[in-house]
């Protein structure tokens, strides 16, 4: 009888090649773990709509930014272990609750489990891949028949920044390759009755003093994806976690910095997108990961 070889993890760009059945590496993940399930009303309007987005926040993360607002689950690993079958059941529960979509938040390191769960039960509402952007194009290819909407961060242009803030010196290369594959997976954006059904939203959080990096990101998107790409320019930066002691990131974003990026967005001729008021830069919009909605059982 031949011994069964362990499956070595190469889901994200870190390519740790470990057997996650009995150990973990950078992301910290072993078995499937969920931190929170909720109706989410704070995403982009075409995602949250009036009924909310059915958000499943997964524990652990393959990026772990030092300014992460969700550090309790991304780095701290807060959450509850569950099974693939129960995850599939969550898809059905959320769908029956009337939400507009199933919103998989920080899902990358559980790609394999999520695909199996979607093979058990595929909701009739859109599946949203809510990602940091630190993906391999091979992983995104696997999602083609499963994911309808890619809600993808584009955090950094300068790899020096991505290395310092997220320990990912190859972020730019991996994120851009992933974005181009996402567009191949979903060639057009479809919005019906104000709610997105298919397509891509590129999110970018403007960081203190780094507005020139933000501008380079917008220029790349225009050149490589076109001005009809939906951009979400985020103004919600709030110092959290390790950023509280960082010489740059401990500061809040200045209104003029966000305005410079927003003006560049308009000047470049993007035809659709979202901006945020300065009032969004608060901890009030961070979900309470210590408390769960008992109506969703997993």
Image (cartoon, grey):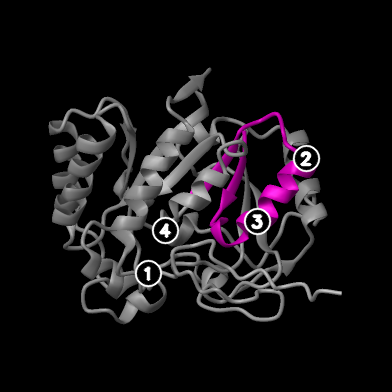
Residue 55 horizontal/vertical position (percent) = 62, 48
Provide the secondary structure element on which disc 1 rests.
Answer: loop
Residue 139 horizontal/vertical position (percent) = 52, 52
Residue carrying label 1: 67
Image vertical order of residue 140 relative to residue 64, above or below: above
Are the residues flagged by discs 2 and 3 in contact, CB closer than 8 Å? no
Disc 4 crowd rating (10 Å Cα; few below 14, some 14-19, many 20+) is many
Residue carrying label 3: 112
Farthest residue to the front: give it.
1
Q: Which residues are magenta?
A: 101-130
Alpha-carbon span between mark 1 and mark 4: 16 Å
Residue carrying label 2: 121
In percent of the image, x 62 and y 39: which residue is there? 146
* The one of 244 and 199 positioned closer to us in this rendering: 199
Q: Earlier in the sequence, mark 1 or mark 4?
A: 1
Provide the secondary structure element on which disc 3 rests.
Answer: helix
Image vertical order of residue 17 relative to residue 154, above or below: below
Provide the secondary structure element on which disc 4 rests.
Answer: loop
Alpha-carbon span between mark 3 and mark 1: 28 Å
């Amino acid at each position: 009888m031949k011994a069964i070889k362990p499956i070595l993890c190469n889901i994200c760009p870190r390519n740790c090649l470990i057997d996650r059945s009995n150990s973990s590496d950078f992301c910290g993940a072993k078995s499937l773990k969920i931190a929170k399930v909720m109706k989410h009303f704070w995403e982009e309007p075409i995602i949250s709509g009036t009924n909310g987005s059915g958000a499943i926040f997964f524990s652990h993360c393959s990026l772990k930014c030092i300014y992460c607002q969700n550090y309790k689950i991304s780095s701290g690993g807060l959450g509850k272990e569950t099974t693939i079958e129960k995850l599939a059941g969550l898809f059905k529960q959320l769908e029956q609750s009337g939400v507009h979509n199933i919103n998989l938040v920080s899902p990358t390191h559980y790609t394999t489990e999520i695909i199996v769960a979607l093979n058990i039960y595929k909701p009739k509402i859109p599946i949203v891949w809510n990602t940091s952007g630190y993906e391999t194009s091979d992983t995104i290819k696997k999602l083609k028949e499963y994911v309808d909407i890619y809600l993808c961060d584009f955090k950094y242009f300068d790899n020096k920044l991505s290395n310092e803030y997220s320990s990912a010196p190859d972020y730019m290369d991996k994120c851009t390759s992933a974005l181009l594959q996402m567009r191949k997976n979903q060639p057009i954006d479809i919005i019906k009755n104000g709610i997105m059904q298919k397509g891509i939203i590129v999110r970018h959080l403007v960081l203190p003093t780094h507005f020139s990096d933000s501008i380079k990101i917008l220029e790349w998107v225009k050149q490589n994806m076109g001005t009809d790409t939906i951009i979400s320019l985020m103004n919600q930066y709030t110092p959290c976690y390790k950023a509280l002691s960082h010489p740059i990131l401990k500061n809040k974003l200045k209104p003029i910095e966000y305005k410079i990026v927003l003006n560049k967005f308009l000047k470049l001729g993007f035809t659709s997108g979202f901006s945020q008021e300065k009032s969004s830069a608060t901890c009030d919009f961070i979900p309470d990961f210590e408390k769960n909605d008992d109506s969703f059982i997993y």
